Image: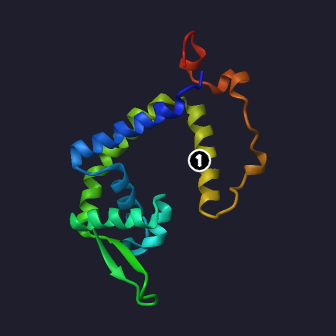
Amino acid sequence: MTEGWFQRALHKLTASDAELDAEHAVSLADFDVLIQLAGAPDHRLRMSELADRALLSRSGMTRRVDRLEGAGMVTRQGCASDRRGAFAMLTSSGMRQLRRVLPTHVRGVDRHFLELLAPDEMACISGVMGRLAARATGGGTLSGEADYQPVDAAHAPETRSAAARSPGGH
């Protein structure tokens, strides 16, 4: 029943990326960089921290920021305390582009992922993602994690979607 789920999820991400590119000439990876910078204090992050947040290598982030800088969406600033370090900073043009792209991204996430989930599935996934995010950012565990009980989906039909419960559902 779960064969190929990763490939199907990847296909949905590819579809979302194609929508952003077709409508705004922005990739999902570009969007991730812009949204990371928009949420940072003063709309800037050290290049190394930005790479970590976007799950890119340092050299991969350098190339991505080069492209975004060429498009006027990001600028680099030197670091006064560490001459080897640099910051990436979202420009006003980058913020405008992000505001244009955001509705397309949200529609894509809704269409390709969220509208497929029942409320109880959404709550479960949200809890798991919250715990994963807390650990990934060094926040340890979230309150209530000790109370978490894994569910064996094969033996708990109330946690599966209607499609999965129906005959022939995957």
* The furthest residue to the front: 59
Q: Is residue 139 left or right of residue 115?
A: right
Q: Residue at x 56, y 32 (%)?
A: 119
Judge the density around disc 1: few (<14), some (14-19), many (≥20) Cα neighbours within 10 Å.
few
Q: In which image quadrant can residue 93 be found?
A: bottom left
Q: In which image quadrant can residue 143 be found?
A: bottom right
Disc 1 marks a residue whose amino acid type is Met
Q: Is residue 117 left or right of residue 159?
A: left
For numbered disc 1, what is the local secondary structure?
Answer: helix
Q: Position of residue 169 (x, y in %)?
A: 54, 15
Q: Looking at the image, is 41 positioned above or below residue 9?
A: below
Using the image as rendered, state which of residue 159 and residue 23 is in the foreground.
23
How many discs appear?
Answer: 1
Q: Position of residue 114 (x, y in %)?
A: 46, 35
Q: Looking at the image, is 100 positioned above or below residue 104?
A: below
* The furthest residue to the top: 167
Q: Residue at x 31, y 50 (%)?
A: 27
Q: Position of residue 30 (x, y in %)?
A: 33, 56
Residue at image mark 1: 129
Q: Residue at x 59, y 55 (%)?
A: 133
Q: Is residue 45 left or right of residue 150?
A: left
Q: In which image quadrant can residue 170 be found?
A: top right
Q: Looking at the image, is 22 positioned above or below residue 68?
A: above
Q: Residue at x 37, y 53 (%)?
A: 29
Quarter in which the N terminus is drawn: top right
Q: Position of residue 144 (x, y in %)?
A: 73, 51
